[in-house]
Image: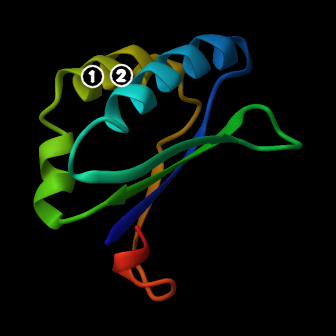
């Protein structure tokens, strides 16, 4: 499995719009056959900070995700909402193993 961790800081005035667009994207993403899990998290102490945890079954699934209409819609919708560039970090599973997903 490949896990993508994305950190996003949103402009304070855009929090609710970002949440709405990101929830819609997460719901659609979770339906993709190549995605094992897709989580949207909001920081407990700083409501402007969000994280995406995206668990892909294969490299191809990660690439296919960026070709979906919901990803394009989300990217366009949130571009002007972010306060700074997103950071992205890729991980590979160690424990539990891939069979647990």
Query: Percent x, y for residue 22?
Result: 49, 25
Q: Is residue 39 visible?
A: yes
Mark seen at residue 86: none
Element class at badge 1? helix
* Label 1, residues with CA under 10 Å away: few <14, some 14-19, many ≥20: some
Residue drawn at (21%, 46%) of the image: 33
**Left or right: where 44 falls relative to 23:** right
Element class at badge 2? helix
Distance from disc 1 to disc 2, alpha carbons, whole Å, reads 6 Å
The residue nearer to you, when weighing 14 against 83, is: 14
The residue nearer to you, when weighing 11 against 6, is: 6
Residue drawn at (55%, 38%) of the image: 84
**Left or right: where 89 falls relative to 31:** right
**Left or right: where 93 falls relative to 2:** right
| Disc number lying in front (1 or 2) | 1
Residue drawn at (59%, 31%) of the image: 83
The N terminus lies in quadrant: bottom left
Instruction: Name the residue tied to disc 1.
Output: 70
Q: Is residue 92 visible?
A: no
Residue drawn at (28%, 17%) of the image: 73
**Left or right: where 43 falls relative to 72:** right
Instruction: Name the residue tied to disc 2.
Output: 74
Is 90 above or below relative to 23? below
């Amino acid at each position: 499995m490949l896990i993508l961790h994305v950190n996003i800081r949103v402009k304070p005035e855009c929090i609710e719009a970002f949440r709405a667009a990101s929830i819609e994207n997460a719901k659609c993403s979770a339906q993709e056959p190549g995605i094992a899990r897709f989580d949207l998290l909001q920081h407990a102490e700083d409501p402007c900070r969000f994280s995406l945890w995206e668990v892909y079954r294969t490299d191809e699934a990660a690439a296919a995700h960026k070709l979906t209409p919901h990803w394009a819609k989300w990217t366009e919708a949130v571009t002007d909402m972010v306060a700074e560039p997103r950071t992205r970090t890729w991980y590979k599973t160690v424990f539990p193993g891939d069979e647990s997903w």
